[in-house]
Image (cartoon, rainbow, N blue to C red):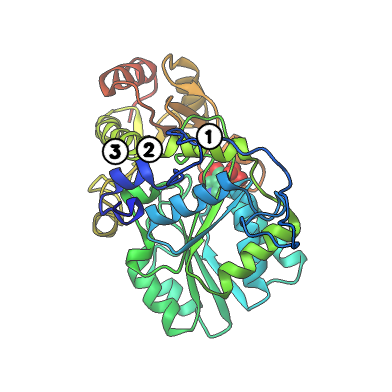
Amino acid sequence: MRDRKSAASIDTLAVHAARPAETAAGDVTPAIHVSTTYERDVDGQYRRGYQYIRDGNPNRAALESGIAALEGAATGVAFSSGSAATLALFQVAAMRGSILATDSSYHGTLRQLRELVPAFGGQVRLVDTTSLSAVESAMDEGVALMFVETPSNPLMGVSDIGELARVADRFGAVLACDNTFATPVLQRPIEHGASIVLHSSTKYLGGHSDVMGGIVLGGEDDWMEAISHIRGAAGATPSPFDCWLYQRSLPTLPLRVRRQSDTAACIARFLSGHKSVERVHYPGLASHPNHSVAGSQMSGFGGIISFQLCGGLEGAMETAARVELFTRATSLGGVESLIEHRASIEGTGTTTPDNLLRISVGLESPEDLIADLHQALGQSPTR
Ligand SMILES: Cc1ncc(COP(=O)(O)O)c(C=O)c1O
């Protein structure tokens, strides 16, 4: 039989990549393997490949190799959250040198870089990675890891993966890319020169707002070995049921993400023409400062839009209060559309403008979502 994982199309890969090739019973839908421990052979060996659940589990193995196939990576290491994945990567990096990272990354990632990494002796440089010159002037041979979040959460900053990979390479550093917002459907960082890709799989990879996880993808090298070692030793592993939920969700990933991206493009155009909206942050708009970079590395611009209201904090809160189809909630990437006021969830120290709302576009009809925003924005102050 043809190797399903070597199929060229991401649509085919998504359906087949995280499924077992064959099982004793011939399951079409993967089984859930809940056993925490595995029997040794009579001579004391573990020839069937599994010993203890923290070290390995068939659902986790299928998930890891499946997402690795989607990203064009050789290996994957799945975690119990995206934050556990970023921290393991930073722990490995800090043992090897400094970390240079996107200064507008997800606020939880910045908290790790500002508080946790320095606490265990790591050196961090937070840089505007959307500017190649800013990165070049902050780089030197002391940097072991360049960590880039593109598009970034929530300001949708876009960094040039190919150019940054060349800079990292020149200084002997490894480039890692948080690909949570784009997913491998819209952006495959390894094809642009990144060595490591990371996801909060709580978002699009799960896709139904019902499972938390993270994953690091990369080559068969000492970085991935060290990340896997930390995961095994620290124990931040996803449960078999969580892994199975991802196995169930991956086949629809391309359909969901393309649809969400197309709808988001319509909504971004609507918002940018609305008189109550001060500014729209969406890489698909020609007004985005790195629109051409986004176009060169993404096949669609994603399902997340941030926008700033003319009516300030009050205008933003009132608009969020008036929506009927969008749910007021944090997180993103699910089938239902969410809207949220970022600054108040990020808390003290946030640099997110207080008139900013972030939308995660779901699978509802674009016309219905636009009509809902239209009515919610109807009574807002205008420019
Ligand atoms: C871009 C990005 N990376 C990492 C994370 C952390 O992931 P998790 O919430 O699964 O720990 C998030 C969470 O929102 C995120 O948006």
- The residue wearing badge 1 is 245
Task: Give the x, y percent position of residue 31.
Answer: 54, 35
Q: Residue at x 31, y 35 (%)?
A: 255
Determine crowd level at label 3: few under 14, some 14-19, many 20+ residues with C-alpha closer than 10 A.
some
Nearer to us in this view, 105 or 223: 223
* Label 2 CA crowd tier, 10 Å (few <14, some 14–19, many 20+): many
> Mark 3 falls on what kind of element?
helix
Residue at coordinates 29% horizontally, 35% vertically from top-left?
268
**Taking 230 as reference, is 360 above or below it?**
above
Q: Earlier in the sequence, mark 3 or mark 1?
A: 1
Which residue appears at 54% of the width and 37% of the height?
A: 244
Please give the residue where the numbered disc 2 appears in the rendered image.
251
Residue under label 3: 258
Q: Quadrant of residue 382?
A: top left
* Residue 49 falls left or right of residue 355: right
| Among numbered discs 2 and 1, the one appearing first in the sequence | 1
Q: Amino acid at mark 1?
A: Leu
Residue 77, given in percent of the width and then of the height, sits at: 57, 57
Q: Is mark 1 within 8 Å of ligand 1?
A: no
Q: Is residue 227 left or right of residue 197?
A: right
Q: Amino acid at mark 3?
A: Arg
Could you say where residue 216 lies in the image, as x and y percent from the top left? 53, 57
Give the Cα separation between the discs numbered 3 and 1: 20 Å
Q: Secondary structure at mark 2?
A: helix
